[in-house]
Image (cartoon, grey):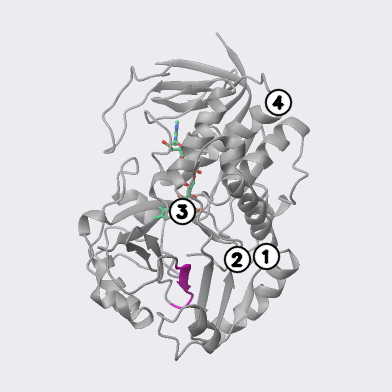
Amino acid sequence: MTRYDVAIIGGGVIGWSCAYHLVKRKPGLRVAVLERCASCGRGSTGRAAGGVRAQFGTAVNVQLSLASIRAFERFQDEVGAEVEFRQAGYLFVTATEKGAEHLRRVVPMQQELGVPVECLDGPGIHDRASYLYADDLLSGAFSPADGYLDPHAVCAGYEGAARRLGVVPLYSTEVASLDDDGALVVAPAETGNRESPSPAARGSVGEGVVRANEIVVASGHWSGDLARRLGLELPIEQEIHYLAVTEPFEGLPDLVPMVVDLDTGFHFRREGAGLLVGCKFRSVGGRFTGGSVPGSPVGAAASSALDLRADPPFDNAFLERLAEVGPPRLPLLSEARFDTRKGWAGYYAETPDGHAIIGRIGDFIIATGFGGHGVMHSPAAGQAVAEIILDGECSSFNIRPLRPQRFAEGDLIRETMVL
Ligand SMILES: Cc1cc2nc3c(=O)[nH]c(=O)nc-3n(C[C@H](O)[C@H](O)[C@H](O)COP(=O)(O)OP(=O)(O)OC[C@H]3O[C@@H](n4cnc5c(N)ncnc54)[C@H](O)[C@@H]3O)c2cc1C
């Protein structure tokens, strides 16, 4: 039986980026990606909005973003896939003094680290985005290097390049536990509502064990549960987020930035001739909770009520919330129609401080907990994991704040610019 140098659990954008960066750095390394589904990107990756931004509230997130944006700019040349990276910019706006104070605090830090971000006042926001209602806006921040891309294309791009370099995909293969010899115990996967169970699908190893010198946990919002079965504690909780797509409508320029109203979480970007739209939302009715509403109970409540292998159900009350917070900021939205079949919900893998977990703990390397920024941080995360495995530590960025041990040590840093 093959003993791999590295086994990566999870074939989402993070797992495949780790695989790609490993074999790119060290051709010939025997790497396998173990994925429960029959193809890549079926977890949160396939549910993402594709936003990419360097406007974050902590230095570590800004640095991961800057490195990742550079990677996305070169993606086609280096990885060999088109990911439709449109650098239309991100425009954050706020009508509250608290929000303005927040931007006054974080923008200088971002600028110092090299983000080409500028602060805007109300008239400045109107000049840049005249389609917004800006009379009440106190402050904004715009970076033209930010933008959005196709999340699945990023994952498939890394997968294709990694496989060309020899990485072995073990699809329809679920990791269940660890045996006494430290091998991964695997079984043919039974999947949720996105596909039929397919034990004989390509690459499945069926029941048995997979042996590897290094094991990477990149299993997204399932990582907390999986970690327990591997004998680890990882504080990952599932948080439900929703997105909706409008029908095409007139009146907006072809290129609009991703606009984010910091006060409501209302955000939108172009999706064809319409818009992809989201906002902070907490589902009512007691069945499940979600959204980034401060204080919103998440995790256990959501987990107990839902089949976590399937997508969370779409809640039409989300559209009602959008109708409340959207048009006051983007008046044209009141003329747009939403196709309820084109809305969806997905899970964030959330940590207590809103930061990913990257680093070694015990016999494992962890790369998970990316909340709403795993697609945009996937290039840097993959590079970091490759350096940890091949060099013993990551030297390209200071990822110490993301180490798994920080929870036990009580050394958390809170990210404030999350959607
Ligand atoms: C609505 C929504 C909008 C978002 N918008 C953005 C955005 O604009 N920008 C951004 O950067 N990010 C965004 N995100 C977040 C982004 O989708 C995630 O951070 C990212 O996809 C995480 O990738 P991952 O590889 O860690 O997890 P996943 O994509 O979930 O992949 C994990 C994989 O592990 C597999 N797996 C789990 N357990 C096992 C097991 N035991 N054995 C084998 N396989 C297993 C799963 O099947 C899955 O394929 C959004 C997410 C949602 C839900």
Question: How many residues crowd mark 2 within 10 Å: few (<14), some (14–19), many (20+)?
Answer: many
Q: Is residue 232 visible?
A: no
Q: CA distance from mark 3 to mark 2?
A: 15 Å
Residue stretch rendered in magenta on the structure: 256-263
Give x and y (percent) for residue 305.
Answer: 29, 51
Q: Circles 3 and 4: CB distance less than 8 Å?
A: no
Q: CA distance from mark 1 to mark 2?
A: 8 Å
Mark 4: which amino acid?
A: Lys
Question: How many residues crowd mark 3 within 10 Å: few (<14), some (14–19), many (20+)?
Answer: many
Residue position marked by numbered label 2 in the rendering: 55
Give x and y (percent) for residue 259.
Answer: 46, 70
Mark 1: which amino acid?
A: Val
Q: Which mark is residue 409?
A: none
Left or right relative to 174: residue 15: right
Residue position marked by numbered label 4 in the rendering: 26
Circle 1: element type: loop
Question: Residue visible at 56% across and 28% down?
Answer: 162
In depth, the one of 350 and 24 nearer the eye is 24
Q: Circles 1 and 2: CB distance less than 8 Å?
A: yes
Quadrant showing the N terminus: top right
Residue 6 position (above or below residue 321):
above
Q: CA distance from mark 3 to mark 1?
A: 19 Å
Q: CA distance from mark 4 to mark 2?
A: 32 Å
Q: Earlier in the sequence, mark 1 or mark 2?
A: 2
Question: Residue visible at 60% across and 78% down?
Answer: 102
Residue 366 position (above or below residue 5):
below
Circle 2: element type: loop
Give x and y (percent) for residue 299.
Answer: 42, 54
On whether ligand 1 comes within 8 Å of the CB at mark 3, the answer is yes
Residue position marked by numbered label 3 in the rendering: 50
